[in-house]
Image (tube, rainbow, N blue to C red):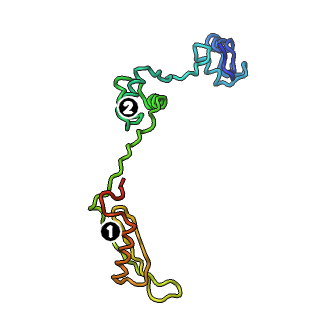
Amino acid sequence: MKLHARAALTLNQRQEVRRLHREDKVSIRNLATRFGVNPTTIQRWVKRESPLDKTTAPLHPKSVITPAYRSAVTRYRQENPGHGPIRIAEALRAEFPEADRGTVLRILQQEGLTRPPKKERKEPRPIPVGYHRIQMDIQQFPAIEGGKGFEYKISLIHLRTRYKYSEIHTDMRSETVAQVLRHGLEHLPPFSLSGPTMP
């Protein structure tokens, strides 16, 4: 058997250490001095029955993914596209005790099922007539530098689409507001069922 790369004692030395300690009652300290190793190393080998190194293989090897387990995971995900690896493993554990997040995720990755399904895009539909409501707003600002008095920002807001149309004037007379309304209606969504669409 191949020894560990950093083994302090050979197989024969390990057996000799155990024999000297058990049969000849040689102390661990004396054995450490005799073989030129740490007392902890001697203590380890006098307790073991075998001079061989312990296996480095994992105590719990990776679960083997059987075809039945793979099929169950795939079928469950297709029937429940919103469920993740943890939830799938819990649902299948009664039938497959080896089910866990890791193996479920591995299966989903191999089957290309890790991405959530794409949402279907809704077809656009006309804006109902009742939703064509407009709000008007007038804001007063000081005239620009060099001017006197005030300026007025007259705005129209289409409440359904939030589309906004604005003009700036030196007055807010009824005639001016009516003019802005006429201009705004040329840019805002038309008032008809065949007009612009909404998502």
* Residue type, mark 2 in image: Gln
Tally of marks: 2
> Marks 1 and 2, how far apart in space?
47 Å
* Residue type, mark 1 in image: Ile
Q: Going 47% across and 32% down the picture, which residue do you hit?
A: 112
> Eyeballing the image, is 186 above or below 44?
below
The percent position of residue 42, horizontal first and vertical second, equals 65, 20
In the image as oriented, which residue stretches furthest toward the left? 130
Disc 2: which residue: 78
Please rate how many residues cluster around mark 2, counting C-alpha atoms within 10 Å: few if below 14, some from 14 to 19, many from 20. Answer: few
Left or right, 99 with reference to 44: left
> Eyeballing the image, is 35 above or below 181?
above
Left or right, 124 with reference to 45: left
Please state, as top left, top right, bottom left or bottom right, where the N terminus lies in the image: top right
Q: Going 58% across and 17% down the picture, which residue do you hit?
A: 47
**Could you tell me which secondary element the residue under label 1 belongs to?**
strand
Q: Earlier in the sequence, mark 1 or mark 2?
A: 2
Disc 1: which residue: 134
Please rate how many residues cluster around mark 1, counting C-alpha atoms within 10 Å: few if below 14, some from 14 to 19, many from 20. Answer: some
**Could you tell me which secondary element the residue under label 2 belongs to?**
helix
The percent position of residue 26, horizontal first and vertical second, equals 66, 16
Depth check: 127 or 114 in front?
127
Mark nearer the viewer, 1 or 2: 1
Q: Quadrant of residue 15?
A: top right
> Eyeballing the image, is 10 above or below 180?
above
> Eyeballing the image, is 108 above or below 23?
below
Depth check: 182 or 41 in front?
182
Q: Going 37% across and 26% down the picture, which residue do you hit?
A: 93
The percent position of residue 25, horizontal first and vertical second, equals 63, 14
Q: Going 42% across and 39% down the picture, which residue do you hit?
A: 116
